Image (cartoon, rainbow, N blue to C red):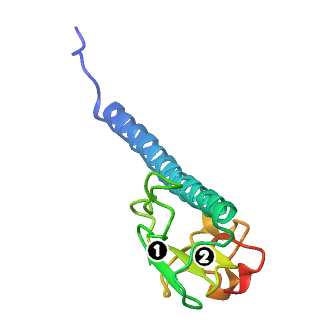
């Protein structure tokens, strides 16, 4: 007697379970890659802006400012006076899905500045960012970034 060809229900279930397990592993790995990519993008953005600020300081003798003590510029895209287009082609934007914003804070005479990536007041930094150096302790550890030697307190 000839046996009918095809798969049994048990064989099909095993294959479906194995595919489901592999899909779950790939999804978890992909989420980690996205988070690392956002972090690398934000680090690169802030480093580029900081270099432009340093070049501005070398040329002008002070950091960019708008004349008021403790002033700041915040948002998904910063608008720091004097940097675009002289020192940067365009100002970077915070990556989509990252949340929070970039902030530039300066002293009234342009002697000090702080350039940080901040999360909103009711949020905490993601674990990948919480381990970074240069924490902004003046804002309850909600950010990290760069600042001038005297800028850590502003």
Q: What is the secondary structure assignment of the residue under circle 2?
A: strand
Side of 40 where 9 appears, left or right: left
Is 48 in front, or is 32?
48
Residue 1 showing in the rendered view: no
Residue 105 showing in the rendered view: yes
From this view, report whether residue 151 is shown above or below residue 81: below
Residue most extreme to the right: 149
Q: Which residue is mark 1?
A: 100
Task: Name which residue lies at 65% across and 77% down.
Answer: 113
Q: How many marks?
A: 2
Side of 4 where 105 appears, left or right: right
Q: What is the secondary structure assignment of the residue under circle 1?
A: loop
Residue most extreme to the top: 1
Horizontal and vertical percent for residue 94? 45, 63
Is 122 in front, or is 7?
122
From this view, report whether residue 152 is shown above or below residue 1: below
From this view, report whether residue 62 is shown above or below residue 42: below
Task: Name which residue lies at 58% across and 89% down.
Answer: 70
Horizontal and vertical percent for residue 111? 70, 79
Side of 82 where 141 appears, left or right: right
Q: Which labelled disc corresponds to residue 143?
A: 2
């Amino acid at each position: 007697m000839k046996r009918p060809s095809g798969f049994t229900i048990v064989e099909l279930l095993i294959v479906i379970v194995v595919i489901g397990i592999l899909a779950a592993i790939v999804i978890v790995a992909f989420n980690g890659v996205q988070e690392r990519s956002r972090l690398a993008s934000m680090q690169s953005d802030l480093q580029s802006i900081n270099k432009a600020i340093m070049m501005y300081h070398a040329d002008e003798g002070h950091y960019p400012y708008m004349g008021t003590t403790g002033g700041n510029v915040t948002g998904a895209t910063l608008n720091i006076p004097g940097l675009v287009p002289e020192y940067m082609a365009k100002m970077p934007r915070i990556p989509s899905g990252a949340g929070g914003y970039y902030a530039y804070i300066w002293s009234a005479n342009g002697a000090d500045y702080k350039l940080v990536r901040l999360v909103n007041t009711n949020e905490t930094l993601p674990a990948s960012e919480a381990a970074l150096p240069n924490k902004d302790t003046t804002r309850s550890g909600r950010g990290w970034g760069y600042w001038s030697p005297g800028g850590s307190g502003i």
